[in-house]
Amino acid sequence: MSDIKTSPRMEIKGLYAGSFDPVTIAHVSIAERAARRLDWLYMAVADNPAKEAEFSPEERFDFVKASIGHITNAEAIVIKDGLTVDHARKLGASVLVRGARSVTDFLDEIALYKQNLFVQDAVGIDSESDGFVDTQTYYTLPNQDHIASSLVRGLINLPGDFDRAKIIQDLVPAPVYDAILVRLQPSK
């Protein structure tokens, strides 16, 4: 093991990327907690055209921007094409922020972490190099571990006569809820 070098504290930026289709209160909670430990947090809507989304990238960006507006050291952005770890490096972020709800999510995050290590190592960046992008995983709060964007999308599209708006209200931030209410209005 090598000696740990200490140097003057550098600004620590993080990148929290996801499809956020739509952003939920659990996502916002993770962003709030990560921002407390970072100097700057980018919350990035990943625009993956190969993935069918409920909301457009522009809608998702607007949702994220409105939902994290109270976090003074956070900014909503959109990323397209390429690896998240490369986007982080371009933004000057040394940390990828990730969220996990369950053991399954945790195992997925370990695999993703290892992939990011592999990709960085392939271009000559190891954990001791300047430019290395590490990962911080935050766990959802116990009262939010059931919340997933896929649950919200399922409720939006689930057939049947029930008060879906009332259920969705507790899962998403107010700006997202307002947009979903409009979407749920019967067509005229």
Image (cartoon, rainbow, N blue to C red):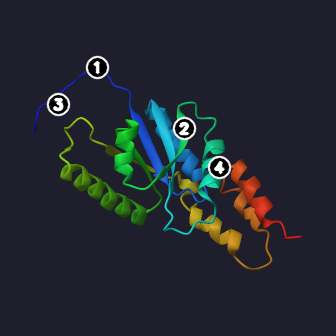
Q: Is residue 33 left or right of residue 103?
A: right
Could you give the CA–CA distance between mark 4 and mark 2, rounded to whole angstroms? 12 Å
The type of residue carrying mark 3 is Ile
Q: Quadrant of residue 147?
A: bottom right
Q: Circle 1: is it few (<14), some (14-19), or many (20+) Cα within 10 Å?
A: few
Residue 117 in the image: state x and y as whole percent. 25, 52
Q: Residue at x 49, y 40 (%)?
A: 42
Residue positioned most to the top: 8
Could you tell which of marks 4 and 2 lies nearer the N-terminus?
A: 4
- For disc 3, the neighbor class at 10 Å (few under 14, some 14 to 19, many from 20) is few
> In this image, 37 relative to 158: left or right?
left
Helix, strand or loop at disc 4? helix
Residue designated by label 3: 4
Residue on which disc 1 sits: 8
Q: With respect to residue 105, does 86 lie above or below?
A: above
- The answer to the question of whether label 1 and label 2 lie on touching residues, with beta carbons closer than 8 A, is no
Q: Amino acid at mark 1?
A: Pro
Q: In the rendered structure, which disc, 1 or 2, sits on the residue that comes first in sequence?
A: 1
Q: Nearer the viewer, residue 169 or 58?
A: 58
Residue 162 is left or right of residue 5, and the answer is: right
- Do residues under tags 3 and 1 come within 8 Å of each other at their CB atoms? no
Residue 52 showing in the rendered view: yes
Q: Mark 2 or mark 3, which is nearer the start of the sequence?
A: 3
The residue that mark 4 highlights is: 63
Please give the residue where the numbered disc 2 appears in the rendered image. Answer: 75
- What x and y, as percent, mark residue 82? 38, 55
Q: Please determine whether, in this image, residue 128 is positioned above or below residue 144.
A: above
Q: Nearer the viewer, residue 117 or 30?
A: 117
Between the C-alphas of marks 3 and 4, the distance is: 41 Å
**Local crowd at mark 2 within 10 Å, few (<14), some, or many (≥20)?**
some
Badge 4 amino acid? Phe
Q: CA distance from mark 1 to mark 2?
A: 25 Å
